[in-house]
Image (tube, helix red, strand yellow):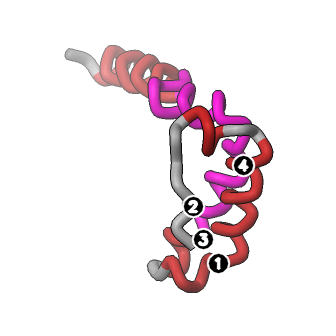
Amino acid sequence: MSNDERRVVAAQTTADDDEPDEWDKRIFSTGCADENAKLTDCYYEKKDWRACKKQMETFRECWKRHGNDKRTDAKDLR
């Protein structure tokens, strides 16, 4: 395979990665994708969920506001 062919394959692979996968579709369907991303980013940066309480609460409120707690039969254990 030539270098040009490798570049084409790499470009196609990268383009495919931009398409939403099943996980992305599920998160988008909750209505809380932005809140989920902020929570995930916080944890990635701090490596400690306790440092992300604000983001967790924002996500939890969004989850309830969109009725996902009923849809998924989630229990609020607080």
Earlier residue among tags 1 and 2: 1
Q: Quadrant of the N terminus?
A: top left
Earlier residue among tags 1 and 4: 1
Which residues make up the magenta segment?
18-42
Towards the viewer: 28 or 10:
28
Residue 13's spot in the image, x, y percent? 40, 23
Rendered position, 40 above or below 55: above
Label 1, label 2: how far apart the Cα atoms are:
15 Å
Rendered position, 74 above or below 29: below
User: Amino acid type of disc 1?
Assistant: Lys
- Looking at the image, is mark 3 or mark 4 nearer the viewer? 4
User: Amino acid type of disc 3?
Assistant: Cys
- Looking at the image, is mark 4 or mark 2 nearer the viewer? 2
Name which residue lies at 69% across and 58% down.
Answer: 59
Earlier residue among tags 3 and 4: 3
Label 1, label 3: how far apart the Cα atoms are:
10 Å
Towards the viewer: 58 or 7:
58
Q: Is residue 15 left or right of residue 7?
A: right
**CB within 8 Å, label 1 to label 2:** no
Q: Quadrant of the C terminus?
A: bottom right
Label 1, label 4: how far apart the Cα atoms are:
16 Å
Look at mark 4 in the image and give the residue it sits on.
Answer: 64
Earlier residue among tags 1 and 3: 3
Look at mark 1 in the image and give the residue it sits on.
Answer: 53
Residue 51's spot in the image, x, y percent? 59, 84
Look at mark 2 in the image and give the residue it sits on.
Answer: 76
Look at mark 3 in the image and give the residue it sits on.
Answer: 42
**CB within 8 Å, label 1 to label 3:** no
- Is the residue marked by circle 1 packed among few (<14), some (14-19), or many (20+) residues within 10 Å? few
